[in-house]
């Protein structure tokens, strides 16, 4: 291309031309809204570490779900906030546990108007705060998978649409798939967090689910951000074990990973725009340094541009309102 014969700005002068040339799309239905569910009634409690986000009791969750449907937000991701905990998270393997109860109520009221995804992990239900059963001070892979499988079947029996294991145990996708199929739930998809880094961006989330480690960290099972190709083996393993889509977390600092996965694998990708990013944008907005919605929109478009099919975001409501207005 040679100037002046080629002038790239010709495609920018007119707003209608700009709209015509845009090739990355973001719709309200691309957004997945994460919600924190607690025991009790008539509870809508703001989360101190996540300004603008709340812990909801199931009755208020149903009210929120109605609003989301009206905004064309079609998918939610549920996290349990449990006061009752044990050493293994086995307490979640019950129909009386908070998320199975919430799923059942949502499906009774809204059926297929909303897609219900359940995060599958034990960290909200263990007394020590780790993602599974501890043996010799570390999360034991295989005994943790046993608990995840039991919890997964309970969720399926409660009516969940999708199960999203976030624990990063080796082989959990295969074992959960086998257990679901054995119990007649071969239609339930599994969306594992296939690429989940041991990230400092998760800090505000810990406060949201009242989860803190007694000791240690999650670096023995979550991935190191210093590795450039480890994600390939994680993705390949989950695909071989029968996953139906993959979740990449965090999204914003790992756009290169999303892009490479998109180029290499033919599988839907969900990017998780995590709590740390949300909180940083909120904080800068409060200081009038940025426009919260405009910056968030730019972040979400960057995640879609990198190759994500859908995005988990705490800003789903604000962004859906902007998109619907547009």
Image: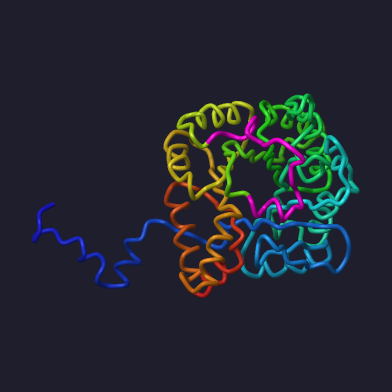
Q: What span is in magenta?
A: 203-224
Q: Residue at point 75% right, 52% down?
A: 209
Q: Quadrant of residue 149?
A: top right
Q: How many marks?
A: 0
- Whether residue 3 sits left or right of residue 73 in the image: it is left
Is the magenta region chiefly helix, strand or loop? Answer: loop
Q: Residue furthest front?
A: 215
Q: Position of residue 15 (x, y in %)?
A: 31, 72
Q: Observer-nearest residue: 152 or 248? A: 248
Q: Position of residue 295 (x, y in %)?
A: 46, 64
Above or below 287: residue 150: above
Above or below 184: residue 30: below
- Whether residue 30 sits left or right of residue 164 in the image: it is left
Q: Does the magenta run of residues contain 80?
A: no
Q: Position of residue 215 (x, y in %)?
A: 74, 37
Above or below 283: residue 170: above
Q: Observer-nearest residue: 14 or 257? A: 257
Q: Residue at point 83% right, 38% down?
A: 89
Q: Position of residue 136 (x, y in %)?
A: 78, 24
- Whether residue 83 sits left or right of residue 274 in the image: it is right
């Amino acid at each position: 291309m040679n100037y002046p014969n080629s002038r790239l700005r010709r495609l920018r002068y007119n707003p209608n031309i700009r709209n015509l040339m845009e090739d990355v799309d973001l719709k309200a239905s691309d957004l997945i809204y994460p919600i924190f569910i607690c025991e009790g009634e008539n509870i809508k409690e703001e989360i101190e570490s996540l300004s603008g986000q709340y812990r909801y009791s199931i009755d208020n969750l149903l009210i929120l779900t109605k609003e989301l449907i009206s905004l064309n937000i079609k998918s939610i991701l549920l996290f349990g906030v449990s006061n009752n905990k044990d050493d293994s998270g086995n307490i979640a393997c019950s129909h009386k546990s908070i998320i199975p109860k919430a799923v059942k109520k949502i499906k009774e009221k809204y059926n297929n108007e909303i897609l219900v995804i359940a995060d599958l992990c034990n960290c909200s239900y263990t007394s020590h705060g780790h993602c599974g059963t501890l043996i010799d001070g570390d999360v034991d892979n295989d005994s943790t998978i046993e608990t995840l499988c039991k919890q997964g079947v309970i969720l399926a029996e409660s009516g969940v649409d999708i199960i999203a294991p976030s624990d990063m145990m080796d082989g959990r996708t295969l074992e959960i798939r086998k257990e679901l199929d054995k119990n007649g739930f071969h239609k339930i998809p599994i969306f594992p967090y296939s690429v989940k880094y041991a990230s400092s961006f998760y800090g505000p989330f810990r406060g949201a689910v009242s989860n803190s480690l007694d000791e240690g960290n999650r670096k023995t099972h979550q991935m190191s951000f210093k590795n450039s190709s480890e994600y390939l083996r994680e993705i390949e393993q989950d695909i071989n074990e029968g996953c139906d889509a993959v979740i990449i977390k965090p999204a914003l600092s790992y756009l290169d990973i999303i892009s490479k996965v998109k180029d290499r694998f033919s599988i839907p990708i969900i990017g998780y725009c995590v709590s740390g990013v949300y909180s940083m944008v909120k904080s800068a907005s409060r200081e009038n340094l940025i426009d919260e919605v405009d910056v968030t929109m730019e972040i979400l478009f960057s995640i879609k541009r990198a190759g994500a099919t859908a995005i988990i975001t705490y800003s789903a409501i604000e962004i859906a309102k902007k998109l619907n207005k547009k």
